[in-house]
Image (cartoon, grey):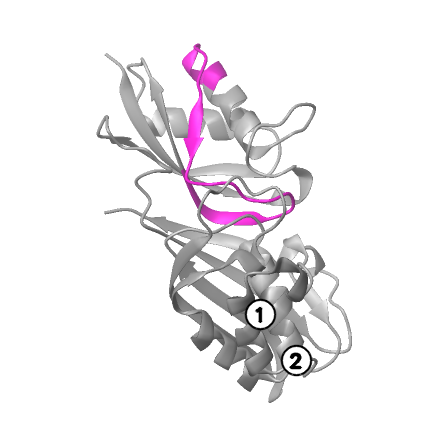
Amino acid sequence: MNTNFKIVIEYDGREYSGWQIQKNCITIQSELEKAISVILNQRIKIIGSGRTDAGVHAYGQVANFIAHTNLSCETIKKGVNSIIKGPIVIKKCDIIHQSFHARYNAVSKEYHYHILNRPDPCAIQRNYIWHIKKQLNIKPMEECCSIIKGKHDFKSFEGSGSPKKSTIREIFSASVSIDRNNTKIDKIVFKISANGFLKFMVRNIIGTIVLTGLLKIDTREFRNILEAKDRKLAGPTAPPQGLFLMNVKYP
């Protein structure tokens, strides 16, 4: 009898061309499928909750796969983690009901984006954070978070080549938090949760919100960009290394 397995995955995205399988590219999905297929001695296709871009990391990506096996979840998890190449780890493996679909059943996803806001760069964390030398003004960034909450058409923040038919998404929460070092702003974390995201949507929002923090645009202009539904008006795409998929929620 076939069994549906749900897995939670953590990965460092630096070495990969994103989540989804692509020709002539090493991806998270392709590496997982190879390893699971070896452990179960059958060809396995996994379904992810969604795609992450090249260079983007995850603490809580979710996927599922169907397999005919008597191996326990713990045996599968340990086996895959022992042979998989690169910084990919299955954190959890469970048997789930047959109708579960990691992508279609997801009700929300949460991303965090990390910014180092100080004149000097960092040595150890440089591959997991966006370094911005000029001090950011947090207040307009917080106001932008309030503006994007709720249901909106996010076409202005959609990356080219997005396969989505609708550009309307609902943002459940958005915030900017500050880690202080010697009373000075050092690290800034942008947190966002929504029912789904367009290609590059989070990074394009971040790139535009940072413009308000640098006082290059004001919050009124940010709102106008959102309502214009024109990607050309929005800011640059933030670099991928600061972005983390934290968790995916299901009913």
Residue depicted at x 71% and y 67%: 131
Quadrant of the rendered image containing residue 91: top left
For label 1, the residue is 225
Apparent side of residue 93 relative to residue 207 in the rendered image (left or right): left
The image quadrant where one finds the N terminus is top left
Q: Are marks 2 and 1 in contact (CB under 8 Å)?
A: yes
Query: Callout 1, which amino acid?
Result: Ile
Query: Callout 2, which amino acid?
Result: Ile
For label 2, the residue is 217
Mark 1 crowdedness (10 Å alpha carbons): few <14, some 14-19, many ≥20: many
Residue depicted at x 42% and y 63%: 152
Asked which secondary structure carries label 1, the reply is helix
Closer to viewer: mark 2 or mark 1: 1
Residue depicted at x 51% and y 50%: 198
The stretch in magenta equals 37-62
Is residue 245 one of those drawn in magenta? Answer: no
First-in-chain label (2 vs 1): 2
Residue 12 rendering spot, x and y as whole percentages: 59, 45
Residue 228 rendering spot, x and y as whole percentages: 55, 66
